[in-house]
Amino acid sequence: MPLRRSATAAVVVAMAAIAAAAVTACGTQQAGAGAGRPQSASPRPSFSPRPKCAQPAEMPTVTPSSPVPSVTAERQKGNGDTPPNYAENHAYRMQRALTAAQLAQGQASAELIKGELEKVRQEGGSGEYGRFSDERIEVALKRLGCGKEHGVYVGNGFYSVHTGVTCVSGRVTKDELDSEVHGAYAEPQPGTGPCVENRGGH
């Protein structure tokens, strides 16, 4: 009788050890991967600081106020027919909110950028569809100190640059020159700077 109980106890102990090993193997985390901390469903947007360029000689003065809603948030707010999980599914298109001071500074930078791009238009020499070469637009932005470290992206008449404060994006062609001041994207289009909206999906 005692022999049977000992054998049964040994089997139970062995089964418990196997189960514990399986649970440990499934729950193993690599060092530095957040062991002991709850894992969030999605990472928080990361907006890396950048050096400044296209800064006006005098900073515009504005009274402090609450952050200006991002363009993305305004689009979502205006569309009342969005599905329940729309915001979560499109979080990668979230823009950094701007304060009134940042917006004013961005608009001043936009005027400087438009001034340089207007020189390109005045020089002429546009190609197909009235577009100028990417190189000419990049040279114009470089005159304001805006280079690769500022996330400059140029293509097919579109340009974008991060001034270190805000994004300035727009179009420049023979017949068009405009700009929009906005915050950097949480997950911009791969292969571009921080100011180009991601056209993909999650």
Image: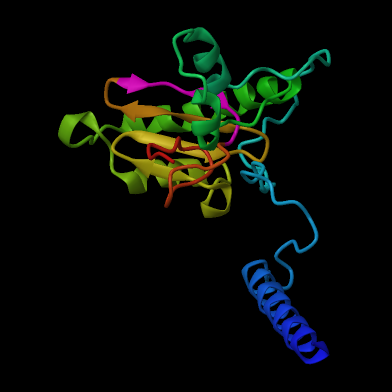
Q: Which image quadrant: the C terminus? A: top left
Q: Position of residue 146 (x, y in %)?
A: 55, 45
Q: Toward which corner of the image does residue 44 lie, by quadrant?
A: top right
* Stretch in magenta: 176-184
Q: Is residue 27 visible?
A: yes
Q: Position of residue 183 (x, y in %)?
A: 60, 30
Q: Is residue 90 visible?
A: no
Q: Nearer the viewer, residue 89 or 115?
A: 89
Q: Toward which corner of the image does residue 32 lie, by quadrant?
A: bottom right
Q: Nearer the viewer, residue 120 or 183?
A: 183
Q: Which image quadrant: the N terminus? A: bottom right
Residue at 25% of width from left, 34% of height from top? 131
Q: Is residue 180 magenta?
A: yes
Residue at 37% of width from left, 28% of height from top? 171
Residue at 43% of width from left, 49% of height from top? 190
Please state if 176 lies on the left or on the right of 80 as rendered: left
Residue at 57% of width from left, 53% of height from top? 149
Please state if 94 lies on the left or on the right of 158 as rendered: right
